[in-house]
Image (cartoon, rainbow, N blue to C red):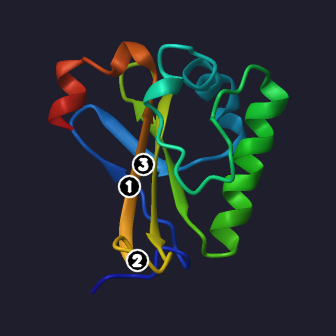
Amino acid sequence: MMTDVYTTCPTFSSKHFDYRQVTTKDAPDLLQAYSDTKSVPLFNSDNCGGDDFHYTTIERMTNAIDYWQEEYQLRGFVRWSILDQVTNLAIGTVEIFDRNAGDFFDDTAILRLDLRNDFEKKPSFVKF
């Protein structure tokens, strides 16, 4: 039986990565991804109110994470940190939400994946 992701946020593990709900303690690690000018153009910012996900200070990264946690409480979306099991560092995030927009993609689950640039081509990531 599937549980409501907004009642209990699940955690996941794969061969190389752990996935758990993002927390502000991830901010220093995630800043490496969200401040990287090679990574930012790959991030999908549709329906994000103009946010380009280019964060260059720990304060801005922490504010973004606070917002992501608020949206979780409002049942807007869920964002998990992706933790490299070798280093135990957050190397990116994955988000999912139900898009309600009255267009072709209405009532469709949208999945976002934001990664540090150096993990974009790692064979271990492709294998999940």
Name the secondary structure under disc 1: strand
Q: Nearer the viewer, mark 2 or mark 1?
A: 2
CB contact under 8 Å: marks 2 and 3: no
Q: Distance between the residues labelled 2 and 3?
A: 16 Å
Which residue is nearer to you in this view: 109 or 67? 109
Residue highlighted by disc 1: 111
Q: Which amino acid does label 3 sit on?
A: Arg
Q: Check the image and name the residue furthest to the bottom.
A: 1
Q: Which amino acid does label 1 sit on?
A: Leu
Characterize the local packing of mark 3: few (<14), some (14-19) or many (20 or more) Cα atoms within 10 angstroms: some
Residue highlighted by disc 3: 112
- Measuring from the top left, give residue 114's x and y in whole percent: 45, 35
User: In the image, which disc is placed on residue 106?
Assistant: 2
Name the secondary structure under disc 2: loop
Q: How far apart are marks 1 and 3 (CA)?
A: 4 Å
Q: Residue at the spot x=34%, y=73% of the render?
A: 104
113 on left or right of 51: left
Q: Is residue 89 visible?
A: no
